[in-house]
Image (spheres, rainbow, N blue to C red):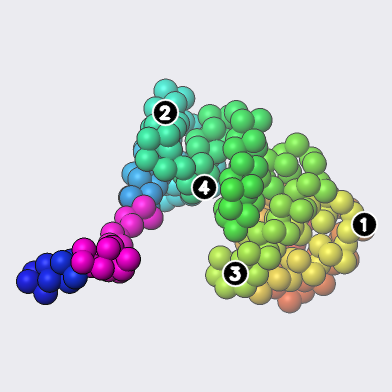
Amino acid sequence: MKIRALLGGCLAVLGGGLTLPARAEPELPSYRDEIVVAEWIAVDKAITAACRWAPGSAGMGVPLSCSRDKLDAVLARIDAFQRTVTPDARLTYLAGLARRHQGDRAAAEATFREVVALDPRRAEAWMDLGELLTTDQRWDEAAAAFTRVTELVPEGPRAWPGWFQLAQVDAHRQQPDAFEDHLRQALRFGFTFRMIEGQPAWQAFWADPTLRPALERMLLVYGDAEIRQSLSGE
C-alpha cells in the first residue's frame, strides 16, 4: 500500500503523464452449460412422465399416448427458461419432441428445422426431422436429413439407425444399389433383420422385384428361413 501511494504521489508530481497498468479482473466461471444440462434432464424426465410407453421402452421411440396438458406445461417451461435464462438448441429439440408427441407434426417439423439451423450438429434433430418427412413421403428431403445423421454419426453402436432409415428411403425411391449399401452399413453397426421381422413395409420391399434380389443376398448371410418366411408370407 505504501509503495502504491508513493508511486501515486510521483505520478501526481509528473503531471499525470504516466498511469499504472489496470489490474486484470479475474474471469468468473461460466455455469451456462451446467444449467442447461440440468434443465434438459428435468424437461426430458417431464416429457417421459407425460406419456405412456410400451413395457421396457420408456422415453424411447414412439409413446403409446401422451397427456396434451402435461406436454403444454413442458412447452411453457422450455419457453420460460429460454426467455429468462438462455436459448439453447438442445432445449429447442425437446420442444420439437413434445410437439411431435402431441401429434402436431407441422409445428414439430418447424421446431426441428429451427434446431438444425441453430446447431447443425444435432443428429437427433435431423433424425426426427427425417422421420416426419418420411411419414409425409417427402423422400428426397428425408434422404437429405438421414444423410446428415450418417455424416454426424458414421460409425459405432449409435450409427445403425441413420443408415437403416436411409436404406428405407432408398427402397421407397427405388434405388436398390443404395438400399443394399446403406442396409449393409446398418448391419455392420448393430441392426439385425429380427428388428423388421414381419413388418408390412418390409414385406412390401420383399414383394418389389427391384428390391428383392438385394434382400435375398443379405438374408443369405444375415438372416434365416424364419425371417425370410415372415417377409415373404410363404
In the rendered image, which residue does mark 2 sit on? Answer: 76
Against 188, residue 151 (above or below) is: above
Q: The residue under label 1 is which amino acid type?
A: Pro
Residue 209 is labelled as 1
Q: Which residue is drawn at the image coordinates 36% and 52% (left, top)?
A: 32
Against 89, residue 185 (above or below) is: below
Q: Is residue 81 left or right of residue 140?
A: left
Label 1 or label 4, whichever lies nearer to me, is 4
Q: Label 1: how many residues lie within 10 Å, few (<14), some (14-19) or many (20+)? A: few
Q: The residue under label 2 is which amino acid type?
A: Ala
Q: Is residue 193 visible?
A: no
Q: Label 3: how many residues lie within 10 Å, few (<14), some (14-19) or many (20+)? A: few
Q: Between marks 1 and 4, how big is the CA–CA gap?
A: 43 Å
Q: Is residue 47 left or right of residue 1?
A: right
Q: Measured from the top left, where is residue 169 in percent x and y?
A: 78, 52
Q: Between marks 3 and 1, how big is the CA–CA gap?
A: 27 Å
Q: Which residue is drawn at the image coordinates 68% and 40% (left, top)?
A: 132
The C terminus is located in which quarter?
Answer: bottom right
Q: Which residue is drawn at the image coordinates 82% and 72% (left, top)?
A: 217
Q: Earlier in the sequence, mark 2 or mark 3?
A: 2
Q: Label 2: how many residues lie within 10 Å, few (<14), some (14-19) or many (20+)? A: few
Q: Measured from the top left, where is residue 187 in percent x and y?
A: 67, 70
Residue 89 is labelled as 4
Q: Is residue 35 visible?
A: yes
